[in-house]
Image (cartoon, rainbow, N blue to C red):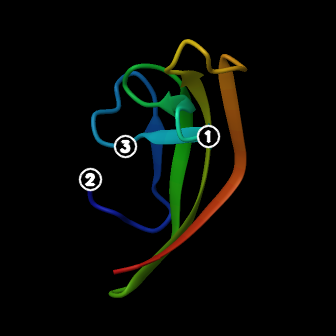
Amino acid sequence: MKAEVGVTQVIDSSSSVIGAQVKYIPTYTESQSWSASRGGGSGTFTVTSLSDGAATGTFSFTASARTGNSLPKNYRVTRGSFFVRF
């Protein structure tokens, strides 16, 4: 996938590259996990700024439970943002 400003990538059942995940690990022996990827869930990922050394953008997704003890069964992430240097 080539990153471009303003391009929104959709996370859904046809996505082969992009995905999102939420993990909750309250103790060393317990964990709960949700993901939005080819296996379920949905969302968007948008690059809002791109330079030779950094990228910024926004994301939102609804992730489906991946472990039997994950509650709620769907986990919604809204108004997410990122800044990465490379």
Q: Earlier in the sequence, mark 1 or mark 2?
A: 2
- Mark 2 and 3 residues: CB-CB less than 8 Å, in contact? yes
Expressed as whole percent of the image width and height from the top left, the position of residue 75 reads 68, 29
Mark 3 closeness class: few <14, some 14–19, many ≥20 residues within 10 Å: some
SS at circle 2? loop
- Please identify the residue farthest to the top as the structure is shown: 68
The residues tagged by marks 1 and 2 sit, at their Cα atoms, a distance apart of 36 Å
Q: Name the image quarter holding residue 14.
A: top left
Eye-nearest disc, 1 or 3: 1
Residue ID at (40%, 21%): 13
Look at 45% across and 27% down and name the residue there: 12
Residue 27 badge: 1
- Amino acid at pointer 1: Thr
User: Residue placed at 70% from the left, 34% from the top?
Assistant: 76
Q: Nearer the viewer, mark 1 or mark 2?
A: 1
Q: Nearer the viewer, mark 2 or mark 3?
A: 3
Mark 1 and mark 3 lie on one chain; the one further toward the N terminus is: 3
The answer to whether residue 49 is seen in the rendering is no
- Work out whether 76 lies above or below 81: above
Residue 18: which disc?
A: 3
In the picture, measured across the screen, residue 62 lies left or right of residue 51, that is right
Q: Which residue is mark 2?
A: 1
Callout 3 secondary element: loop
Residue 15 placement (x, y as % from top left): 35, 32
